[in-house]
Amino acid sequence: MRNGAPREERPGHDDMQEVSGGHFAQYVFHKLDPAWRLLPTQEQEAHKRELVETLERFTDRIDIRSYSLVGIRADCDLLLWSFADSVDRFNELGTALCSTRLGGYLRPAYSYLAITRRSVYVSRHVHEGQDGQRLRIQPTNRKYLFVYPFVKTRPWYRLTQAARQGMMDEHIAIGHKYPRVKLNTTYSYGLDDQEFMLAFETDYPQDFVDLVMELRHSEASAYTLRDTPIFTCINMGLREVLDSLGGARATAPLPAG
């Protein structure tokens, strides 16, 4: 689990790309079986320690970010947002997680797979702090993360590039009005059911609400087929996320044993 120092990227949906990327992203939302909270304290401590140690073994291959959704959504409790250069790394991580004792109480409620690609829409919108052509995901440590899958209607793809560019210019201009919101766009064509995964980072949830409301009035919004479910996530270290699940605390390093 690493903390990055990323450059800024403004909000704005992208699609049809020119160059394939090589940075894969996975968003896995887990739901905890409440039966775990009835276990003895020593077992809970051992389970949390094992899970932390297991994920830490992957830090040289996968960048893993953890978020809590406890008390926010009823169908999931935590998010592991991971980045790697190969889909195989996610398979290895998932296998290791399922092999832990706490993993036996965690049910994947939602799982999304995507990859970075270069946008054809932002070339005329280059500005300081923005890199619309990036092929690496560089998340920040902002407190809130808003995640959702996104699908456009088929008529969108029958429009000319010029028509789509005009609507995206409006879309991006709206995004520029909310500099405290950073967008990470990844693409799922052929990898998963959705076409995009959108992940917005901010310390100001009210800015994100205002952004989404304004985008509803944009011309491109008419070509949105689906943009739910939407997940509101709170950025925490892994031990803090595990503490948010209840049971024995894990915020302080746990003793070996």
Image (cartoon, grey):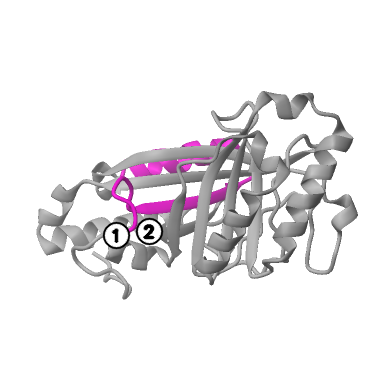
- Residue 186 placement: quadrant: top right
What's the mark number on residue 3?
none
Q: Amino acid at mark 1?
A: Gly
Label 2 vs label 1, nearer the camera: 1
Give the residue displayed 78% in from the left and 51% down from the top.
170
Chain part drawn in magenta: 71-100
Q: How far is the residue under mark 2 from the one under mark 1?
A: 26 Å
Q: Which residue is mark 2?
A: 53
**Please, which residue is most extreme toward the bottom here?**
252
23 versus 8 height, above or below:
above
Give the residue displayed 69% in from the left and 46% down from the top.
13
**Nearer to us in this view, 155 or 101:** 155
Q: Amino acid at mark 2?
A: Glu
Give the residue displayed 75% in from the left and 27% down from the top.
157
**Nearer to us in this view, 170 or 101:** 170
Does 218 sit left or right of 231 as displayed? right
Task: Sort mark 2 into few (<14), some (14-19) or many (20+) by Cα contacts within 10 Å.
Answer: few
187 versus 202 height, above or below:
above
Give the residue displayed 79% in from the left and 58% down from the top.
131
**Nearer to us in this view, 39 or 177:** 177
Pick whichever of labels 2 and 1 is earlier in the sequence: 2
